[in-house]
Amino acid sequence: MSKKQKPPAYQHYAKDFLTGTAGMSCAEVGAYIRLLDHCWDGSPVATLPDNDEQLRRMAGAEKDEWKQIKDTVLAKFERRTVEGKRLLVNDRMMDYWKELVGFSESKSKAAHARWDKDKKKAPEKSATGGKGFEVEEPEDFPTGGKGFDPEEA
């Protein structure tokens, strides 16, 4: 699944979120959820730039406010090198993304296997050249020995 195929939304598990943010202020929770949304929309998925000013702006915080909340908010992210870049990673979102990609790939493989199986079962073209089918009228069909005459109907 590529970024272009990525769903526009991610699962938000309310109980887990409330538990994980229980000690945060409203400002910290707001900044955190905004950064999670940027993480989902980021490339690679589940990452943010390791740049304090960019993070502050992404979080929607004023400079003084950011100084007060950033340590608590950024504790939910880990600094790592990803694809040769120094980034912040949210492990939970990264795990969710990997699970989503794995699920998508398994469903795609299963669908291709079904399609390939169906192709092998497909009947060969009929005598009509695949443009239709032929129907034979059974001998004991009750037509009274004559065909349908629209004039008599």
Image: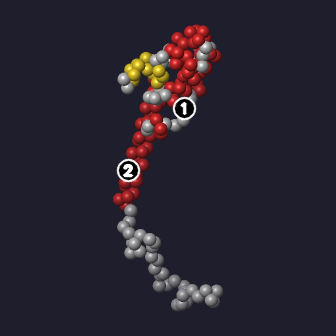
Q: Earlier in the sequence, mark 1 or mark 2?
A: 1
Element class at badge 2: helix
Q: Residues within 10 Å of mark 1 (few under 14, many from 20)?
A: few
What x and y, as percent, mark residue 136?
Answer: 46, 79
Q: Quadrant of residue 109?
A: top left
* Tag shown at residue 19: none
Pointer 1: what residue? 11
Pointer 2: what residue? 113
Please name the residue shown 43% across and 38% down the image. Answer: 1
Please name the residue shown 48% across and 81% down the image. Answer: 137
Does the rendering let one see residue 19?
A: no
What x and y, as percent, mark residue 78?
Answer: 45, 17
The CA distance from mark 1 to mark 2 is: 29 Å
Q: Nearer the viewer, residue 113 or 144?
A: 113
Q: Give the colouring mode of the picture.
A: secondary structure
Q: Nearer the viewer, residue 95 or 15?
A: 95
Element class at badge 1: loop
Residue 115 shown left or right of residue 67 in the figure: left
Q: Amino acid at mark 1?
A: Gln
What x and y, as percent, mark residue 43?
Answer: 46, 29
Compared to residue 19, the image places residue 65 above or below, namely above
Please name the residue shown 37% across and 61% down the image. Answer: 121
